[in-house]
Amino acid sequence: MNEPIFHFYGNKAGVEGADQIKQVIDDATRGSEYYKRQQEKRLQVLQKVNKMQIELENYNKNEQRKKDIKEIIQNKVKEFQINTDRIWAHFDMDMFYVACELLDKPELIDKPVAVGQSIVSTANYVARKYGVRSAMPTFVAKKLCPDIIFIPCHFEKYKSVSNIFMTILKKYDDNLESMGLDEANLDLTQYINNSQEDPAILCENIRKDIFLATQLTASCGVGPNKMIAKLASEINKPNGLHVVQQSPIAVLSFLEKLPVRKIPGIGNITEQILSGLNFNTCKDVRDRADELYIIFTPKTFEYIFYSCWGVSRNYHVEFEDQHSISCQRTFSSISTQKEFEDKVDYIAEKLAEEMQSEEKVGNHLTLIIKTSKFEIRNKSLQLNQYTNQSKQIALYGKQLLKIMQLDEPIRLLGLKMSSLANEKQIQKQSISTYFKKQFDKSNDQENQIASNMGSKSHNIYEDSNPILKVQLQQPEQSKPEIISDDEVSSISNQIISGVNSKSNQSQAQQQKFQQKQQAQPKSFNCPICNKDIDCKGNNTVLNKHIDRCINQQNVIAEQSDESNKNVKDSKKKVSSKIENKAQKSLNFFKKGP
């Protein structure tokens, strides 16, 4: 019972002989850091399972409590219904990365092949018969299959094929939900209602179109919701189709003997806990739901419980619900600061590309690393502005890296940006906030003119309180050209007191900043006072000057003795004057310095 259970055996299409595979993996990894880590996790699981078993024993002895909990479960079953009004399809390209490579290397089709370097990304079905699967270390894969052939990843190639795949699917559901490059969920309800096509025939024709366009096969599952369609797509892999009919009876029959571990979202640890408590199939969960209710948190219970009843989302979720975008890579162990920083630069670039393609910005960055001992560490930082730029992300990431003070090799590095917002909305809000403040001031000044009618002339001063500042970099945030010394200092101050980013920068970084600044125009024309401002290539200087101009702007209005007669003209004059300046500023922001 104390032996580790590895997450990369068994539960994968094409993998056979789990017990024999496990023995090979145990022999290949025994004594390694990974094995030790898995052993620690296994002990933690066993402790948790033992504690839950005691809890269940006490529960089963309490007849009144059992009666109460069973009543709660019965009420939950009555509350929901398995909705079968909609038709979903899940398309999954077979062994996608390897399949793309085999198009260029057809001589390897009948040989065991995998894509990856230190970690297996994808293996073909020949290799899977030996137990090789994704997320497995390559040295383990070679133990299982000594003749396996490894091919490096070529992401640009995969993206190109994926674009063709997604373009075909979008003909049937423009709002499809992509799950990486090789999987997608489609709500076919509207298309089928309009065309009156049979779902099975339609999906078979789509699979044919995918093959004609890419020369690659795709498996498909059809069901009344997203989860059922996903599970169905696994039934006849590779190059197959499985349809779960649109009825509650068909859904429950489909799930009856399905292993719980197949439910999307149930990971290795949860699977081990459920297995340790003899929850092996969806039927086990349904029959003993009261026990599940006792041992798990409400959130975990409801997810497992409803999933085993076939209740899942059958509508599209707006993209705005996405909470984060992340990018991470696994590699052979690295140990120097230079290697760490190079990885941060690379990951930051990939993360920025993903964020820009989704038109997202974020202001909460997390650095994630996995050590050579398979320990996960992370550090987070709330940024002082939204960004989706690789240079800024890398700069923040390297500061987090310094705070981590890594003293051992690492084998995985990732960056995650959360607190996401729509890039265009953030830009629009920054400008709108600024001009709302300006027009509010205009109204205040008009009221002051009306209250002081009869005087020959009045100086009307703006309120002494500083206006809400608009970050002029914000509208240009998608393509900033300068990271100023002020910004670098601000980054460091956020992370840890006493860290002076400017003094800690390498000479190469300083030269890079200086070269960028020297390439910028040395002066700009202020849109408020029309003076040439010596900015020395630094946007911060110009920003401060414009803020000062706005705050110190004095609007002078002449009032004649015939104030009653001219009050309307006076209001129009002041309002027009401020609106003209505001419009002038808006044009400046749009144009950029």
Image (spheres, rainbow, N blue to C red):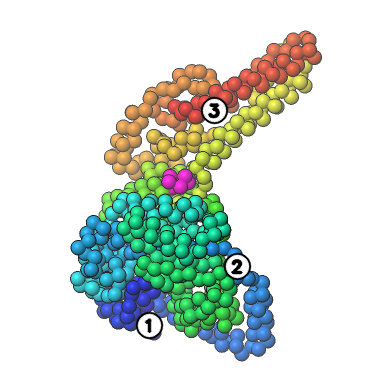
- The residue positioned farthest toward the top in the image shown: 561
* Mark drawn on residue 2: 1
Picture quadrant of residue 416: bottom left
Q: Earlier in the sequence, mark 2 or mark 3?
A: 2
Q: Is residue 514 above or below residue 151?
A: above
Mark 1 vs mark 2, foreground winner is: 2
Q: CA distance from mark 2 to mark 3?
A: 51 Å
Q: Which is closer to the viewer, label 2 or label 3?
A: 2
Please name the residue shown 38% across and 44% down the image.
390
Residue 251 seen: yes
Q: Position of residue 67 (x, y in %)?
A: 67, 85
N-term-proximal mark, 3 vs 1: 1
Q: Position of residue 431 (x, y in %)?
A: 56, 34
Residue underneath mark 3: 586
Q: Residue at x 27, y 79 (%)?
A: 24
The answer to whether marks 3 and 1 mark residues whose Cβ atoms lie closer than 8 Å is no
**Range covered by the magenta-colored residues:** 355-361
Q: Quadrant of the C terminus?
A: top left
Relative to 251, say whether 277 is above or below: below
Task: Report whether 549 appears left or right of 561.
Answer: left
From this view, report whether residue 133 is shown above or below residue 591: below
Between 166 and 501, the one nearer to me in the picture: 166
Q: Secondary structure at mark 1?
A: loop
Q: Residue at x 36, y 47 (%)?
A: 349
Q: Does the magenta run of residues contain 538?
A: no
Q: Quadrant of residue 79?
A: bottom right
Of the numbered discs 1 and 2, the one sitting upstream in the chain is 1
Q: Amino acid at mark 3?
A: Leu
Q: Is residue 344 left or right of residue 54?
A: left
Disc 1/disc 2 C-alpha distance (Å): 43 Å
- Please tell me how crowded label 2 is: few (under 14), some (14-19), or many (20+) other residues with Cα within 10 Å: some
Q: Is residue 584 above or below residue 63?
A: above
